[in-house]
Amino acid sequence: MTSAATILNDNAKESIDMRQQLREVMSGVCTPVSVVTALEGSVPFGSTVSAFTSLSLDPPMVLVALDRTSETLAAIRASGTFGLNVLAAAQSGLAMQFAKKATDKFRDVLWHNEAGVPRIEGASGWVRCTVHDLLDGGDHIIVNGLVRAASHTPETSPLTYHRRRFGTHAELA
C-alpha cells in the first residue's frame, strides 16, 4: 500500500523535474533582454527581464512578468507606471547589474526621468506604460501595460539571451 507521504514526495520530485525540464527548454529560446523601470517618489527601481512581449496593437499594450517579491514590482504598483528599456547589444553589463538583488542598481547608470519613468541611455528601444491590470502568474505577476510612448534606435542591435549567454541578432544569409 502506498502512503500519502510517498505520493506527495513523488509529486514533489516530478514537480522539481518538470521545473528543470522547462528551464532547459526555455534556455533554448532566444529572447530579447530588457530592464523594466519605475519610480517610487524620486527613487528609481529596475529589474532585468526576458519575459516580456507586445500584447496588442489596438490598443497598444505590452506585458511583462516580474517576480512577486520584486521591489520594482512594488514601485510599479505604487506609481501605476513603468518603462521597458530594450537593451542594446553593448549593454550586457547593465543586464547583469539589474538582475541582482541590490539597492544601488542605478549607480553609474546614465538615465533620466521621462514623464515619471526612468529611461536608460543607449537602449535600443523604450516603451512607457501605465498599468492596465495585474494577473497572477504562479511565482510571478504579469503586468499588462497600456503603451503611452515608444521609441527605438533602428541602427542599434538588441541584446539577446540564449543558452544562458548574452548575444545579439544576426540576419541569415
Image: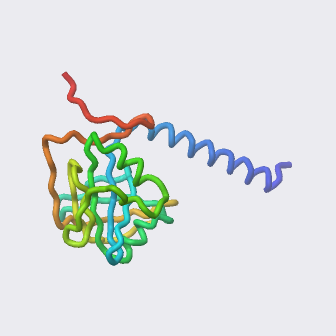
Coordinates of residue 77 in the picture (x, y in percent): 38, 74
Say above or below: 170 vs 145: above
Q: Residue furthest right?
A: 1
Is 164 on the left-hand or right-hand side of 156?
Answer: right
Q: Residue at x 40, y 54 (%)?
A: 98
Which image quarter is the C terminus in? top left
Is 56 on the left-hand or right-hand side of 64?
Answer: left
Q: Residue furthest top?
A: 173
Q: Residue at x 39, y 62 (%)?
A: 142
Q: Residue at x 27, y 64 (%)?
A: 118
The answer to which image quadrant residue 66 occupies is bottom left
In the image, 34 versus 29, the foreground residue is 34
Coordinates of residue 39 in the picture (x, y in percent): 32, 71
Coordinates of residue 164 in the picture (x, y in percent): 45, 37
In the image, 11 versus 51, the foreground residue is 51
The answer to which image quadrant residue 154 occupies is top left
In the image, 21 versus 40, the foreground residue is 40
Is 58 on the left-hand or right-hand side of 78?
Answer: left
Q: Residue at x 80, y 55 (%)?
A: 5
Q: How many marks?
A: 0
In the image, 143 versus 73, the foreground residue is 73
* Scheme of image coloration: rainbow
Coordinates of residue 161 in the picture (x, y in percent): 37, 40
